Image (cartoon, rainbow, N blue to C red):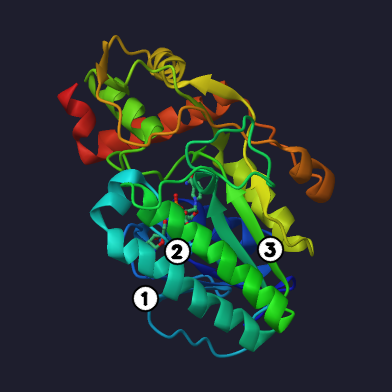
Amino acid sequence: MTGTAGRAVVTGGAGFLGSHLCERLLETGYSVVCLDNFLTGDPGNVGHLIGRRAFRLVECDLTEFVHIPGDVDLVLHFASAASPVDYLKLPLETLKVGALGTLHALGLAKEKGARFVLASTSEVYGDPLQHPQREDYWGNVNPVGPRSVYDEAKRYAEALTTAYRNTHGMDTGIVRIFNTYGPRMRPHDGRAIPTFIRQALTGLPLTVAGDGSQTRSICYVDDTVAGILAMAASAEPGPINIGNPDEMTVLALAETIRDIAGSDSEIVFVERPENDPAVRRPDGTLAATRLGWRPSVPSDRGLRRTVDWFADLLAVTGEREEA
Ligand code: NAD
């Protein structure tokens, strides 16, 4: 079935970002085929969409050949482990989905004549020597460092997407997504925001890496999804940064989350991971001028919504009772 807006395929659609994308696409009149092997995602993330006529969930591994019968207008390629805990545990799977998975997703878009949007990442800038990061900055990545399985997979995926565009005249776009947070992140996925929220809500110490002076720019998921869909609706090739320039230190982030959660957990300092970026902030000029997109959810509001969602989740799973 094709919706009034067309038919979209979302790879990695049962993950955090992918599930929000599926939801928004359905709201805007697309019919959606969600492809996922549930490696780091969960069918429960799209459980509320199952049964809708315009939605189909297909279990499949993108590193294998992928075939979808019928027309497809848009392919959003989001399949990939994304949190450091996941990709350090799954190094080969991460490299394979970046290489073979992207190849197969591009092949699908080529076969169908669909627009293709690649979920790339601010991690392609590595530990950046330019601040804030503009899209014409080539990055500072250690190709054999622990994070390289993710960073280089995404850099390769960008190169492959560009080569398909140039060789086959395909309609492709690349978004470089910066740290995004919101409901449906996993409490134990190792990323700073869900970790701090879980710790604050369960009375555990908040574990800040290093002295906490490294910075991150955090974007609420609804804003990120709106930016991605603006890219999908455009003919822009990118890469275009999608992120919130609202930069804060990791220590300030921990303190803010502790306040919002009404927690009296202490803050402790733990060893900082190797090659952890010192600063991170998108230059949002291209997103604003080419896509007309700017983030609009202030961090205190987005964090409150996320803390509330985690409080409900942890109460259901029983983890909150330990506090
Ligand atoms: P996630 O782990 O929640 O979602 C990734 C999804 O991909 C999961 O559902 C997983 O099961 C699926 N997947 C992995 N390998 C697969 C394979 N071989 N075949 C089929 N499905 C597969 O992560 P996320 O945070 O939602 O990230 C989604 C995408 O956005 C990733 O490509 C990530 O690199 C990119 N991104 C995310 C962020 C962020 O802040 N969340 C930032 C930059 C880029």
Label 2: which secondary element: loop
Residue 239 screen position, x and y as percent? 67, 54
Residue 71 screen position, x and y as percent? 65, 86
Q: Nearer the viewer, residue 61 or 146?
A: 146
**In the displayed structure, would residue 304 be above or below residue 288?**
above
What residue is disc 1 on? 61
Amino acid type of the residue tagged 2 in the rendering:
Ala
Instruction: Residue at 44%, 70% (x, y): give it.
Output: 99
Relative to 90, 288 lies left or right:
right
Q: Nearer the viewer, residue 304 or 75?
A: 75
Q: Classify 10 Å Cα crowding around label 3: few (below 14), some (14-19), many (20 and above).
A: many
Q: Is mark 1 within 8 Å of ligand 1?
A: yes
Amino acid type of the residue tagged 3 in the rendering:
Gly
Point out which mark residue 79 bears. Answer: 2
Q: Nearer the viewer, residue 127 or 247?
A: 127
**In the displayed structure, would residue 77 be above or below residue 286?**
below
> Marks 1 and 3: which is nearer the front?
3
Position of the N terminus by quadrant: bottom right
Instruction: Residue at 75%, 45% (x, y): give it.
Output: 287
What residue is disc 3 on? 173
* Mark closest to the chain's N terminus, 1 or 3: 1
Label 1: which secondary element: loop
Residue situated furthest left in the rendering: 322
Residue 248 screen position, x and y as percent? 53, 20
> Marks 3 and 2: which is nearer the front?
3
Residue 37 location, quadrant: bottom left
